[in-house]
Image (cartoon, coloured by chain):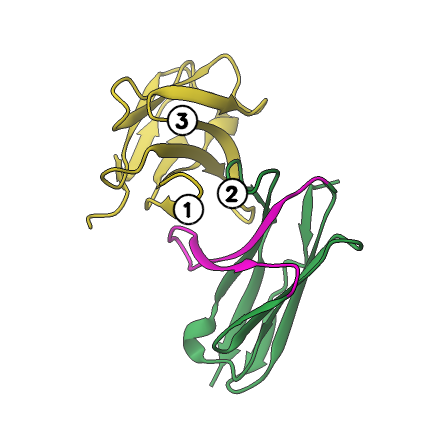
Chain colours: A yellow, B green
Amino acid sequence: DTGVSQDPRHKITKRGQNVTFRCDPISEHNRLYWYRQTLGQGPEFLTYFQNEAQLEKSRLLSDRFSAERPKGSFSTLEIQRTEQGDSAMYLCASSLMNQPQHFGDGTRLSIL
Amino acid sequence: RKEVEQDPGPFNVPEGATVAFNCTYSNSASQSFFWYRQDCRKEPKLLMSVYSSGNEDGRFTAQLNRASQYISLLIRDSKLSDSATYLCVVSPDNAGNMLTFGGGTRLMVKP
């Protein structure tokens, strides 16, 4: 069991640039979730997939954010035209249906 | 007002002490409840689910009061390794999707 894998671990970029993060879930987990966590706060739900279908999106997910899971395995989260307020840890989790979520180590995004 | 409220702490306790954390949630339709543990700069990890009848896992006891919308976690005989942030988590469905996290309570166990 290799766990949930996220890449990159850390991304530093200038304001206005686009960034893309990747998440590889635990093998055979059909549900995949994205969360965002800022310093001193708990994670905030962004969106989740069951297989390739995106079932729910938080209102936190503005038009600049898009997530995909084209083949029902790995997922990508893209942020366009990054802003200072996007600086955060982006966490991915996966689970089997009705089972606990397992989190990856996260991608830390820093906007200069 | 946050959906899940916790005292951020820190709670500084000596080894062997008993410590209790509480949280309140605002969505009365919440269906499933959890405590997660998060070490500094690490990912959250499920500590235990919380059931209406209360449940225990070793030194950890969780309680849920649906009428008061209140969840608690009791840690007995604290260990140095219990030092972490404890996150109170609720979900609107029984499957535990779309988790809503509290801000966390930081625990520091001292020798």
Give coordinates of residue B108: x percent, y percent. Answer: 52, 72
Task: Please give the label number shown on residue A99.
Answer: 1
Instruction: Tell me how far mark 2 sits from mark 1, CA to CA.
Output: 8 Å
Task: Please give the label number shown on residue B106.
Answer: none
Instruction: Tell me how far mark 2 sits from mark 3, CA to CA.
Output: 13 Å
- Residue B50 lies in the magenta-colored region: yes
Question: What residue is shown with label 3?
Answer: A49
For this orientation, the residue located farthest to the left is A2
Residue drawn where x is 37% and y is 33% of the image: A32
Instruction: Tell me how far mark 1 sits from mark 3, CA to CA.
Output: 14 Å
Give coordinates of residue B107: x percent, y percent. Answer: 54, 68
Q: In this view, does A17 lie to the left or right of B98?
A: left
Task: Find out whether the residues at labels 2 and 1 contact each other: C-beta distance under 8 Å.
Answer: yes
Task: Find out whether the residues at labels 1 and 3 contact each other: C-beta distance under 8 Å.
Answer: no
Q: Give the range drawn in magenta.
A: B29-53
Task: Please give the label number shown on residue B96.
Answer: 2
At label 2, the amino acid type is Gly
At label 1, the amino acid type is Gln
Closest to the camera, between mark 1 and mark 3, is 1
Q: Is residue B103 left or right of residue B58?
A: right
User: Mark 2, chain letter?
Assistant: B
The quadrant of the picture occupied by the C terminus of chain A is top left
Q: In this view, does B6 lie to the left or right of B16?
A: right
